Image (cartoon, rainbow, N blue to C red):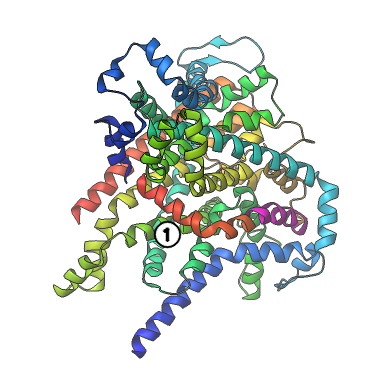
């Protein structure tokens, strides 16, 4: 009895230490963002929150157009998410619930697109954006990301289980065509699936770096991640300033994640096991 | 339930889905002439077309074009000049490219082995913990949803030679500080630590899902036969997790071979030499960072495309090798 209790306690001790390592960077980022860099250079350094957060935010805002780039990122992430949810769900609905000529081939093709790594396409993508006149605009970030193979594949699996065939049949007998069945039967039944795909898409768009780095060439019009990296380049030794930026860039997502985490992690696990 | 069964369901007989919608019609309808098919199934084709349109314009055409580009010399502005396989010949003799490839492999090795091992340990512990599992899952998973840029900036500050937390602790312990971001090996350690920190929890959560799918009767039966904890782990846990371990190895191989953001953000400051130098001695110059530098800093698009294809081939080979190693090792047990 006591032995099992001791073992359980030891187990939780190790797990808590692991969780602390996992969470430590968030804490330390917040500590540095609330102290001045000078205080952080002391030996031993300060390990508690300080009063300098607003001073650091002030310096951050005078260094880069932080809220401008955050707004850009918010626009890109929201538009991408909305488009992905619509295009992916309607395509997944067609693939999951209808038989039509060429379906197998097209779904196989869709799965094959997983295999192509992004860097193969980067140079020509940039050339195409230049031809379209989209270099430096948010179009270049939103349009190519408006539908994706992962979302269609994942939602198709989801729809197969979540949308009842007899309800679809009943709707059809009532005279509903494909689009009405999608809108009135399909969409309401797959809301939790859409929530997962929406969060994943939003997080990925918010955190995207490589492509915005290449295509957002105007220094006054950047997305958050690119702006952060430039801040790091210029103010490399002013850690309080740079980490204030990092903290403000991470905070909104961390809040969203913790709010939705339970369902999110469960669905992420499901997706991996299907692979 | 699984991808395989549902794929089979969609290939063969008209399942309940078809029967229910009625639009699938008799099996013969599938051989209808394309024109009739369009009239009948146009909503479905319209629904799936946005993806295929975007894929064609922004992925398929670019990939084919980059293959074409790899046999040309082009700075993005002037005429494209056909040079045959010269870019690839240059690449074979390019010491910087080989160094970048070697760096990529080393960083992959130094991050993935500890990462997957730790993930297995964490998953096993989570599986036997009864309380607070919700908290642990969130705590271990949250690094994975944070941006690589912010994380890299954080690690850059913590490992800073003069002002970093790590060296401050070393100093406090009366040890001499380490110039983390200067030395060839410590640079790789820092990059590996970033990857490890971000992905251990993700892999642990994946392993946990696999562990929970193993029926407890298997363990009980083995225990009755006299198996100890170590035997249980190697005879039941590892073999049953085999497909999931394979999945994590493949994913981390593909991700690891494309490491870019960590060294780019970490050493973007080194603009005296080159904005994408990969740090002192090029110790953090990964293959994709080298690609980025040749294509977008030096505007050598033809050579950049050749690098991208060479890296792609390397990824395919290395993934295949890893696949075989993992499968064989599991079989041997």
Q: Secondary structure at mark 1?
A: helix
Q: Which residue is mark 1?
A: B204
Along the line of sight, the residue nearer the viewer: B62 or B19 = B19
Could you tell me if residue B155 is visible in this image?
Answer: no
Q: Which corner quadrant of the image does residue B80 belong to?
A: top right
Residue A3, horizontal then vertical, whole percent: 34, 87
Residue A113, horizontal then vertical, whole percent: 43, 30
Q: Which corner quadrant of the image does residue B214 belong to?
A: bottom left
A240 vs A11, left or right, is: right
Along the line of sight, the residue nearer the viewer: B268 or A201 = A201
Q: Is residue A251 magenta?
A: yes
Give the residue displayed 68% in from the left and 61% down from the top: A29
Q: Which residues are magenta?
A: A239-253
Along the line of sight, the residue nearer the viewer: A210 or B202 = B202
Q: Which corner quadrant of the image does residue B123 belong to?
A: bottom left
Q: Is residue B229 magenta?
A: no
Give the residue displayed 28% in from the left and 52% down from the top: B242
Could you tell me if residue B220 is visible in this image?
Answer: yes
Give the residue displayed 61% in from the left and 41% down from the top: A205
Q: Is residue A150 above or below residue A143?
A: below
Outermost residue to the left: B225
Q: Quadrant of the C terminus of chain B?
A: bottom left
Tell me which chain the residue with mark 1 is part of: B
């Amino acid at each position: 009895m006591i032995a099992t209790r001791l073992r359980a306690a030891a187990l939780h001790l190790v797990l808590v230490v692991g969780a602390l390592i996992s969470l430590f960077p968030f804490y330390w980022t917040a500590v540095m963002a609330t102290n001045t860099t000078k205080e952080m250079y002391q030996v031993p350094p300060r390990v508690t929150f300080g009063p300098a957060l607003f001073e650091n935010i002030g310096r951050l805002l005078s260094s880069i157009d932080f809220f401008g780039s955050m707004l850009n990122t918010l626009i890109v992430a929201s538009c991408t998410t909305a488009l992905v949810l619509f295009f992916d769900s309607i395509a997944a609905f067609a693939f999951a619930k209808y038989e039509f000529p060429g379906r197998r081939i097209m779904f196989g093709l869709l799965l094959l697109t997983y295999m192509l790594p992004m860097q193969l396409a980067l140079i020509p993508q940039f050339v195409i954006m230049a031809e379209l006149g989209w270099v430096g605009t948010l179009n270049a970030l939103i349009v190519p990301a408006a539908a994706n193979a992962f979302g269609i594949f994942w939602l198709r699996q989801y729809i197969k289980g979540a949308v009842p065939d007899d309800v679809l049949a009943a709707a059809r007998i009532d005279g509903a065509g494909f689009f009405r069945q999608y809108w009135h039967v399909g969409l309401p039944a797959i809301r939790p699936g859409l929530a997962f795909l929406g969060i994943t898409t939003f997080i990925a768009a918010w955190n995207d770096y490589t492509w915005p780095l290449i295509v957002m060439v105007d220094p006054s019009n950047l997305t958050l991640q690119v702006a952060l990296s430039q801040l790091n380049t210029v103010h490399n030794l002013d850690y309080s300033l740079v980490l204030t930026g990092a903290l403000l860039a991470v905070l909104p997502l961390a809040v969203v994640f913790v709010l939705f985490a339970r369902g999110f992690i469960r669905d992420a696990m499901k997706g991996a096991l299907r692979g | 339930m699984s991808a395989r069964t549902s794929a089979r369901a969609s290939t063969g007989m008209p399942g309940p889905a078809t029967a229910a919608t009625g639009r699938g019609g008799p099996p013969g309808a599938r051989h209808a002439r394309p024109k009739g098919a369009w009239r009948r199934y146009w909503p479905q084709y319209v629904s799936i077309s946005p993806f295929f349109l975007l894929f064609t314009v922004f992925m398929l055409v670019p990939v084919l074009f980059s293959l074409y580009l790899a046999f040309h010399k082009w700075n993005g502005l002037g005429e494209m000049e056909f040079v045959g396989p010269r870019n690839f010949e240059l690449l074979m003799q390019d010491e910087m490219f080989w160094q970048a490839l070697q760096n990529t492999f080393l960083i992959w090795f130094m991050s993935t082995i500890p990462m997957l091992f730790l993930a297995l340990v964490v998953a096993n512990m989570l599986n036997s913990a009864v309380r607070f599992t919700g908290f642990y899952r969130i705590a271990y998973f949250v690094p994975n949803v944070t941006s690589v840029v912010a994380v890299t900036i954080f690690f850059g500050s913590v490992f800073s030679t003069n002002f970093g937390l790590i060296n401050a602790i070393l100093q406090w312990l009366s040890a001499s500080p380490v110039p983390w971001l200067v030395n060839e090996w410590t640079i790789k350690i820092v990059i590996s630590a970033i990857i490890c920190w971000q992905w251990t929890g993700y892999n642990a959560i994946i392993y946990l899902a696999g562990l929970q799918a193993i029926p407890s009767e298997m363990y009980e039966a083995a225990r009755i036969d006299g198996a100890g904890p170590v035997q249980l782990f190697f005879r039941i846990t590892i073999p049953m997790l085999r497909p999931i371990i394979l999945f994590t190895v493949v994913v981390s191989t593909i991700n690891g071979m494309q490491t870019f953001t960590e060294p780019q953000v970490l050493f973007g400051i080194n603009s005296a030499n080159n904005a994408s130098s990969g740090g002192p001695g090029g110790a953090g110059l990964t293959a994709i960072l080298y690609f980025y530098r040749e294509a977008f800093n030096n505007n050598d698009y033809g050579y950049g495309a050749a690098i991208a294809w060479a890296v792609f081939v390397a990824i395919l080979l290395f993934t295949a090798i890893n696949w075989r190693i993992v499968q064989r090792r599991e079989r041997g047990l």
